Image (tube, rainbow, N blue to C red):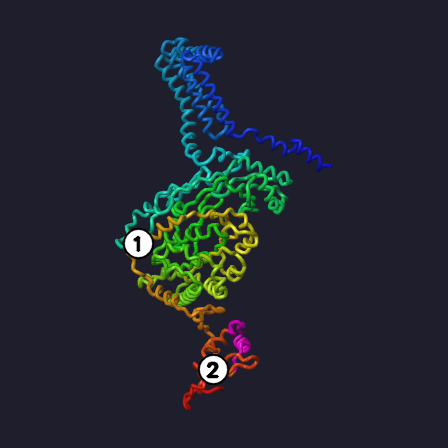
Amino acid sequence: MAKDKNNNKNKNGNGKNGKELKKNPVLAQWTKKWIKAILMFLVAIIIVLSFPVFDKAGAAGRFFMMASEFLVGKALYTIPLFLFVAGLIFLKSKKKGRNLAMLLAIIISIVGIAGILAVKDISVASGGWIGYLSAKLFAGLFGILVANIIFGAILLIGLFIFLQFIWQEIPKEKLEEEKRPSFVLNRPENENVKIKGVVEDKQEKPSPAQNRISLFRRGGMDDQPEKKEIRKSDSPPKGAYILPPLDLLQKNESAPTSGNIKENSMIIKNTLDNFGIPVEMAEVNVGPTVTQYAFKPAEGVKLSKITTLSNNLALALAAHPIRIEAPIPGKSLVGIEVPNKVRSTVTLRNLLSHPNWQNSTSPLFVALGRNVSGAPVYADITEGPHILVAGATGTGKTIFLNTLILSLLYKCTPDNLRIIMVDPKRVEFQNYNDIPHLLCPVIYDATKTINALQWLTHEMERRFEIFSEVPARNLATYNQNKSVIASGLQLPYIVFVVDELADLMAVKGREIEAGVVRLAQMARATGIHLVLATQRPSVEVITGLIKANVPTRITFQVSSQVDSRTVIDTSGAEKLLGAGDMLFSSAKSAKISRIQGPYVSEKEVKKVSEFIAEQAKKVEEPQSVLVQNLKNALERQDAKESAVSGEFFGDEDPLFNDVKKIVLETQKASASFLQRRLRIGYSRAARLIDMLEEQGIVGPADGAKPREVFADNKGDATKARLIPGGGLDESEEPSDDGGWQKV
């Protein structure tokens, strides 16, 4: 019964919810502003039509003229002007509580004018009774000169109040109203709710190094000086490599439109109240893609109750899809991310102009985009150390890869960065073919990709040997070694970028997986990093071994929760909006961040790649040995020679010589025997047997019979030519002293 009474009480508007609903105004703020402005314009027009020149306002107009002339004299002719300006200010301003200040400014200004008119002859006709009495008072006390000064000061006070409204509001709003409706900045009824992000008025505090660059500003607009201005003190020697200027990239970002923030906050609060979940609205973060409404639920409320109401909130807000972050990492708040009415276009140029990127010392520091607060987000690939990118077709994966590559090209010269690109689709990376950063032309087929993985593994092992001689723990330590710098033997970072992993896995799945896993496990210290992208985030493509060794993951919009969990181990990616909207997770932080990636057009990519290609003519090839070795590896066409099997590449299993010796000594050759003897897995043991057969050391399998073992009279393996049934070809005539014998 008590529960029913409470429900009825709320429904009748007598309870807490009813009171809160009554506080919600019937008229929207922009409607009130228009009403005030129209009334001001109407009164101004009526007064003008009441002037004796027109006399079109009837008896009421003539009465107003008589009353006004009685009070302020000829100063009444300035009243329409003040009313018209006040109407404009009401129309453009977004702040409340200015009615009294506006009325006070009009009265003070008119009194000042009336006094100035009346003090000349101290008469009622010029300044009305108000001007006459005040002029007589001040002229009698201070004289006519001082009285004029006093009335001039009164007029200036009134005008300064108007100027405050005009200069602080109208120009500022003109800049913003061209981009978004006036209701974007309507604050919730609770004045403690903070609105942050791209519509926040406050700017970030600049650091000492930021005096050359303006920081990220409201509306997503970074009006930073160009990069060339930052580097203007640098005068590179003639013929040296020059990093590309930011002029090649698109500059301006568009502003987002989040809708009526106040109204949406009330809808969220009331919807949750209707389901018995009282909340207190805390802050609003306006980002380029979504607006995050943060609130604090009452004590004792289960977060699962809030997350299950996503569809109800989407219905109430008329926005789909919405994403609930419960809780917001690092805060005792829950966030509801609502899509903006108009999305902001994030540009790479503004991200690369930001001090966070300009002042970074890492060579592999890349721009990711802007978060839900509009703040720029960056990532260091060296700390990644590898990146997995997934998402459905058309959600922004390839544009993100272009963003990542351009970030690297703007940061690194060919001396400290080399890139290997794999593009099974053959159309995404063709613009980069002429840049000097490439170790080889863009790779298009799976066989050459496997060869490249093999070469990277050999290069990784070679670098480990070099590091052990210095000694050095990683590539950064090695390159900073004084003896290495003096000898000019510094090594570049190598980034291996794959645009479509699923296509390669479909052709050479086991080989590709083994090569990727081997590099992902060990290559970090040697400066070799992987960036793997796929549009099919299934367990057949993103296997458990790949996931375990690639902790930094980015997912764009996917079709289902299953795909989302496959990539980032949680749901949410299925509710993204596409067009660069992504979720980012890394091993360093358990927090999953929502980021809007920058848009990079093909025209921008072409401009940058052409500029860098021109630089290639000025730069000598610093790593010709690397390039030649990789070229030789890619030219090998024998699949058996270049295939990846098990944990090792090709025929270079370190156990091969030991296995050969054991087989010749024991005269036994079987996978199970090698498993027991060497304590290895079946797949590796079977592969070793196949390798022995290929080199003619053992015969082919013959059902349940053991394999035959072939050796010379010294017990060494040889290249015996076998006939299909096993044994030696009869054309081979073994000699008595060093020929072949069948054991």
Q: In this rendering, would 4 be left or right of 564?
A: right
Residue 32: horizontal and vertical position, in percent?
Answer: 52, 27
Residue 306 highlighted magenta (yes or no): no
Residue 659 lies, with reference to residue 352, above or below; the image says below
Q: Which residue is mark 2?
A: 723
Quick one: quadrant of the N terminus? top right
Residue 54: horizontal and vertical position, in percent?
Answer: 42, 13
Residue 471: horizontal and vertical position, in percent?
Answer: 39, 65
Q: Amino acid at mark 1?
A: Glu
Disc nearest the viewer among 2 and 1 = 2
Residue 555: horizontal and vertical position, in percent?
Answer: 50, 52
Residue range of the region highlighted in magenta in the rendering: 668-686
Mark 2 or mark 1, which has the lower sequence index? 1
**SS of the residue at dot 1?**
helix
Q: Which residue is mark 1?
A: 614
Count of all numbered marks drawn on residues in the image: 2
